[in-house]
Amino acid sequence: MALGAYVSPIGEPGKRPPLRAQRSLRPATRTVALLGFGTVGRAVAQILCRTPESHLRLTHVFNRSFERKRVDWVPDRVQWTDNFHEVLNSNADTVVELLGGLEPAHEYIRQALISGKSVITANKHVMAKYGPELLELARRHGQQLEYGASVGGGLPVLAALHYGLAGDRLLRACGILNGTCNFILSNMEAKGTSLAATLAEAQKLGYAEADPSDDVNGLDAACKLAIVARLGLRAELNAFEIPRQSIANIQPSDFRYARQLGCTIRQISLAELDGQGVYAAVTPALVPLNSPLAAATDNQNAIIFKGERSGETLLVGKGAGGDPTAVAVVSDLLAIREGPCTPATSLAEKYPVAHLSCPHYLRVSGENGVDVLDALAPILDQHGVALEKSLEHSDKGKREWALTTEACGTGVVRELVRDLAQRERISESPLCLPILNSE
Ligand code: HSE
């Protein structure tokens, strides 16, 4: 045998095994209907159609105005349709939902499960909001519902929680769960590009949501965080109530100040059990340069789990884009077992969201170049916020201060920012971000 030659587990030397043969020696053919032929849908279809020896057979593509979407590399035997009932009444045994958004995706998933089809979905909105009831529905109908692509793109975040870390009690999940925001922030810093231009680039590359404000304002990451908290921390959170701060107010000067403080800026999703509740937030934050989260650039996601016994586990990789997400979808297709099965139902309990206490970064500027530092001190005092450091920067008559505070609650900080924004001598909206510690 030549050095490095591949020997197939089913006995044919030199040839890669069918995808499924890596798990089972005699796979049955699985017939797959695809809902949605956008960036991820196309990438999934490419894997299915260009891996001819695979036992995964694409039978239907459902899309509105499908005539515009047709491509010649999809075999003629595949049926294109804009009628969901055709999919429902077809012989496809598995539906891959890649439409995004809450409705009609949620209703289509329900109907597919009820009609005896297993479902794979990348839909974080649906799984954050309806995950437990859909998993229960799948169990009652003897079908599987897999949703690994809903968090982390190509990064096996949910697989790690389902299998690798299931034996531990997880206390904390902290990381980057939105590839678009990571692309924007890391490129704003590295290339000095504007937020609008970098977002347009992320849209072109297929990273952003159909409505990219969900990326920028943190809703996309909040849905993923709710799924991670349910599976990892056994904490059921309402994704739509997780406190969020948009990245839209980050300016080039914030990266400069962050550097002076030994940090960069990333959109951070954090959920941490604190005894009575769970602290959860999605917010841009100052991240120490020596943190692995600071090293994640472009469309990467990175997440650090902290377990009682396993300590810290880091996962990092491509978190957005057609190909990485399609890999997660096809991996889920391969994970579907034959016959009825019992998916893990959620054991999560409902938790209130608590406030975390940590040091903060505060940027303020004075109206018409006036000095606001003197005025700031008593206001911070009133709110019980202690100042730690201050950095000043003057530019063309505009005087700006970046301050750091000692540890204070995020609720207190929110009140402080609201108060500052109403003060006459202070111009523009003050910006306040948590500072992650370097542990
Ligand atoms: N818009 C999402 C992101 C896609 O940027 O992370 C992957 O879920």
Image: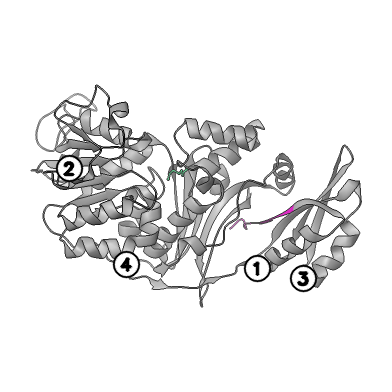
Q: Which mark is residue 346?
A: 4
Q: Is residue 290 visible?
A: no
Using the image as rendered, state which of residue 19 and residue 11 is in the foreground. Answer: 19
The numbered disc on residue 411 is 1
Which numbered disc covers residue 426? none
* Identity of the residue drawn at 39% across and 68% down: 234
Q: Earlier in the sequence, mark 4 or mark 3?
A: 4
Most extreme residue toward the bottom is: 276
Regarding mark 4 in the picture, which secondary structure is present there?
Answer: loop
Q: Which residues are magenta?
A: 430-439
Q: Is residue 288 magenta?
A: no
What is the spatial separation of the Cα atoms under label 4 and label 3, in whole angstroms?
40 Å
**Which numbered disc, 1 or 3, marks the residue that appears first in the sequence?**
3
Q: Which residue is mark 2?
A: 86
Q: Are marks 1 and 3 in contact (CB under 8 Å)?
A: no
Label 4 is placed on what type of residue?
Ser
Q: Residue tagged by mark 3? A: 383
**Label 2: how many residues lie within 10 Å, few (<14), some (14-19) or many (20+)?**
some
Neighbourhood count class around disc 3 (C-alpha, 10 Å): few under 14, some 14–19, many 20 upward: some
Quadrant hosting residue 422 = bottom right
Looking at the image, which residue is at 70% across and 59% down?
360
The x, y position of residue 318, in whole percent, is 43, 40
Structural crowding at the residue carrying mark 4, measured as other residues with C-alpha within 10 Å and reported as few (<14), some (14–19) or many (≥20): some
Answer with left or right where residue 52 lies relative to residue 420. Answer: left
